[in-house]
Amino acid sequence: MTEVSLRDEPGLPSAQLRETLPEDPGRALRIARKARNAFAYPRLVVGSTILVILVGSSVLAPVLATQSPDAIHPLARLQGPSARFLLGTDALGRDQLSRILYGGQVTFIVVAAAVLVAASIGTALGLASGYLRGWIDTQVMRLMDGLLSFPSLILAMTIAFVLGPSVLTIVVALSVIQVPSFARVVRSQALALGKAEFVEAARASGTSTVRILYRHLLVNMSDVLLVQLSIAAGQTILTEASLSFLGLGVPPPAPSWGGMLHDGYPYLQFAPWASIIPGAVIFLAVLAFNLVGDGLRDLLDTNRQRFV
Amino acid sequence: MLAYLVRRVGHAIIVLFGVTLVTFLLTRVVGNPVQLMFGQGTAVTPQQVARTRASLGLNKPLVLQYLTWAGHALTGNLGRSFTEPRTVASDIASAAPVTIELTILAIVLAVLIGVSVGTLAAVRKGSAVDTASAGASSLALAVPNFWLGLILIYVIGLKLGWLPVSGFTPITASLGDNLRDMVLPVLTLSAFYAGSYTRYVRSLVLAGLSQDYVRAAEAKGISRARVLRHHVLRNALIPLLTVIGLDVAGLMGGAVVTEVIFSLPGVGSLLENAILTGDVPTVEGTILVIAVGVVVLNMVLDLLYGYLHPQARVIYD
């Protein structure tokens, strides 16, 4: 970034200087190199493969599903896996495979919305807190401490309870509980980066606070944010499923993995697949996000020696 | 230490004030208690609402409502349940021992597994044991506790018939039966933490093993086991204490799910029932008690940590 502005500066002996500047291999090449390196990180590869399969099959649900997720087959209730119903049927005789595919859409949309909202609010609070310091920092961190004193699931349950059952409620509940961890991670990064020389240089040259926050702090912590996003997504899937299991999730008839498990649980003895299969899908999704998070951290740790 | 103690207790009091405020605002302002009481989506006439609001004191100014509520809560009066002819405080008092027993057993089991497996993995770094423990902890960290509980119920309870799948014997009735009922719930709740502590202890022990004082101790001819016990683990357990402190809140959330799966009559089941039946005072009371418990426990663990490790006597970094 700074290299570009230096080159554009008139009056610099650009020819010689440019030769001494490190050659930028170009964005595409850098990404390609990182991607090739990624194969040295099996957790990242396994995790992202599972994720691609899960997200891909949810997106392709209309093509892949053999039945409508809401079609009720009264004569085929709680049937085990068969050629007609590959993963069996639930207590109303609905095809489990189709419900899992469509349920993935509901789950991923809810989780993505909640994580993005939490990341935006948490990042803004963390940047303000860590860069501006002073009373803002104290107030924000006090608020985050207050939120963290509530067990996150219990806070989410309470929010879901007071707002009443709806998809928006779930998104609000899931994002509120993720805000503190984003705020904390971003704050600690902002504290460290705020002391870096290039930030001081930017401040000395009169760069506006907003621009420093964006160009110098946010861009330089994007890798840490990426790891945090992945961790938050795994936790959010888990919390969403827990809420559904407790009967406080996405209201029926929309299929959701946690809701399917909740509905199938009473029939555990006679129809274990009705609850164990949706649970296995939730487990895979959480595992995938955790693996991606761990893998990304390993991958980025090697690039991260620059500041600390 | 005294200055730290005063500041830490002061900090806890501020957080507690915040906790009461959040609880109060959530149920009284964000939510509509009268609607919650009648059930979401039920048609209620304005006259009914007005009458109920007046009888519950909800037409008074918010500040006054808060002060009355917080004042009562301070003296242990959490109001009466909307659905049961009992006080919220007595319901919580009879449910709390179950939750406390469940969480203590779970954390003890998780620490035992974490310390032993984590140490073994660190000492045999790169071996099959290390790889297996890394794989197992990744699985343990991702497995949803309700799903694990379900599988344990299905396999151990229903298929093998080894253990009861639900129900609860009070500790006062029969200690043996009580512990038998607790086996599956404790396993369910502790899995995540066992995985997390295994990872953490492994990295702590690895860091410890590379210290100069460890090399010095080994050079003196002290046995590996003694070095581990007296030099490495003793130092590793202090940071583990902080992590346990941070987990207290999550553990309470996990306890709710675990109690519901295994129908244990703890605080979590109480909260779940109260939410499903729209029993606002019980919801308020239980989340307040849980949050206060978390704040107080965190404070106690922080003080203990500060006592053991003077450098850590800082509230904000």
Image (cartoon, rainbow, N blue to C red):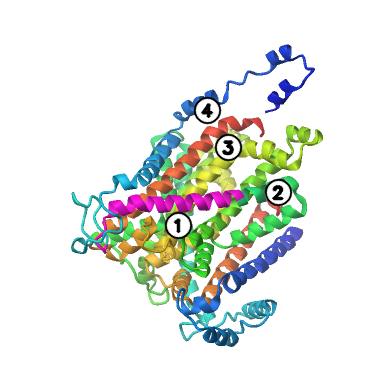
Q: Which residue is mark 3?
A: A223
Q: Which percent across, then down, holds residue B163? A: 30, 64
* Mark 3 residue type: Asp
Which of the chains bears the disc numbered 4? A
Q: For the residues marked 2 and 4, what is the alpha-carbon distance in whole angstroms?
A: 30 Å
Q: For the residues marked 3 and 2, what is the alpha-carbon distance in whole angstroms?
A: 19 Å
- Report if the CB atoms under discs 4 and 1 are less than 8 Å apart: no
Kindly identify the residue that appears in the image at 58 percent across and 42 percent down: A225
Camera-side residue: B56 or B297?
B56
Kindly identify the residue that appears in the image at 59 percent across and 81 percent down: B77
Which of the chains bears the disc numbered 3? A
Q: For the residues marked 3 and 1, what is the alpha-carbon distance in whole angstroms?
A: 26 Å
Q: Which mark is residue A141?
A: none
- Queried whether the magenta region covers residue B100, the answer comes back as no
Q: Secondary structure at mark 2?
A: helix
Q: Which residues are magenta?
A: A91-120
Q: Residues within 10 Å of mark 3 (few under 14, many from 20)?
A: some
Q: For the residues marked 2 and 1, what is the alpha-carbon distance in whole angstroms?
A: 29 Å
Q: For the residues marked 4 and 1, what is the alpha-carbon distance in whole angstroms?
A: 33 Å
* Mark 2 residue type: Ala
Q: Which mark is residue A31?
A: 4
Label 3 or label 1, whichever comes before in sequence order: 3
Q: For the residues marked 4 and 3, what is the alpha-carbon distance in whole angstroms?
A: 13 Å
Label 2 or label 4, whichever comes before in sequence order: 4
Dot 3 and dot 2 within a common chain: yes
